[in-house]
Image: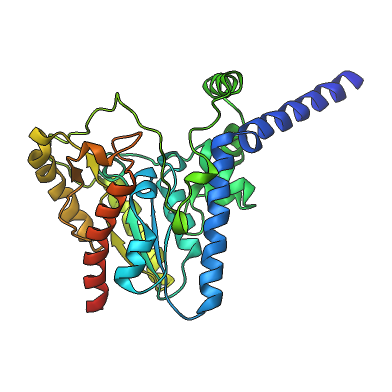
Amino acid sequence: MKFLLKLIACAVAAYALSLVMTIWANPEVRFWRDVQVRRQAEIATARARVPQAPVILFTGGSSTAFSIDPAVVESACGMPAFNLALPAAAAPRYLLHQALEQARAGDIVVVGLESDFLADESAYPAGMFAFGLALQEGRPAATVGNGTFPDTLGLRDALNFSRPGARYLITLAYRGLSGKGYRYKASDYRHHGRIETAVTNPAMVPHDVLSKQALSSSGKVLLTQFRDAAALKKVRLFYAMPVRWTSTENAEVSRSANEALLREIDAIIPVIDDGTRGVSTARADFSDSHQHLTAQGSLARSQALAGKLAELLGRL
């Protein structure tokens, strides 16, 4: 009996240690959770200042986090704007759900999911990163977007998400021993949630789309479910395709390849046509990734998008 109790105690201690390492000791989760807390506090401040005024919320993967400048959008549209985007590792359901949770009736939500999510067939599995953010917020069911989407978080998944894998442990050890830590810092946070980094990647390669893209059946279900959930909250939706650095010789091919996907998305969620069709050939506008814009890249992208969004809002 004592052996059994010791075994159980060891198992509980091992799980607790893995939970701490995976969630609270994870520098990536810590950084983005701090970002979420700052964003939510700023939204609360804006709503307290003018309680009935609508706000604009942007969500999507890191390409949106680095590209949309709320200050530019606020100037063009005349209402507060916030960038709620997170790394793509959070998975689409969490990315969409966490933004809709912040929205109220009359607000505008702009979806900036990367095209891969919508063109490729996927079950949209959740992962450790989303679980870490959701758990720290005290709402683990948000990992799978429960409340916006019909999915539920099972016990097996929760236990798996709490377990650090070998790759994570090796990465954590490397960062600790090298002193490098996580790539992004608190100082990378900009107005109302935009992220900007001074880190560059000289080895970065362009992202060329050379074949026609179409909305997958799973992408259609994802967008339809989100549209319906937003309608229940009386939230207005738009889609804005993130831009990626594309080689000059393949720019037009890539733009054409994205057009079919945008047409199909527009049938579910209105698309903001900023003229880019997800393509930019300005290598200098990108920092550490072919989809992370620099300050100047974000400014140009935000100006183009904000002008078109202002036109759309003026027609409503």
Q: Position of residue 168 (x, y in %)?
A: 54, 24
Residue 153 visible within the image? no
In the rendered image of this protein, does residue 218 appear above or below residue 272?
above
Of 175 and 138, which appears nearest the observer? 175
Name the foreground residue: 174 vs 129: 174
Q: Residue at x 13, y 49 (%)?
A: 260
> x%, y% of residue 283?
22, 36
In this image, 219 relative to 182: left or right? Answer: left
Q: Residue at x 33, y 69 (%)?
A: 75
For image coordinates 77% across by 28% down, the residue present is: 13
> Is 148 drawn above or below residue 30 in the view shown?
below
Whole-percent x, y for residue 135 in the image: 62, 46
Q: Which residue does the image show at 56% across and 23% down from the upper left?
A: 175
**Position of residue 271 in the picture relative to residue 66 (left or right):** left
Residue 30, quarter of picture: top right
Left or right: 12, with 299 as reference point: right
Q: Is residue 232 visible?
A: yes
> x%, y% of residue 187?
51, 45
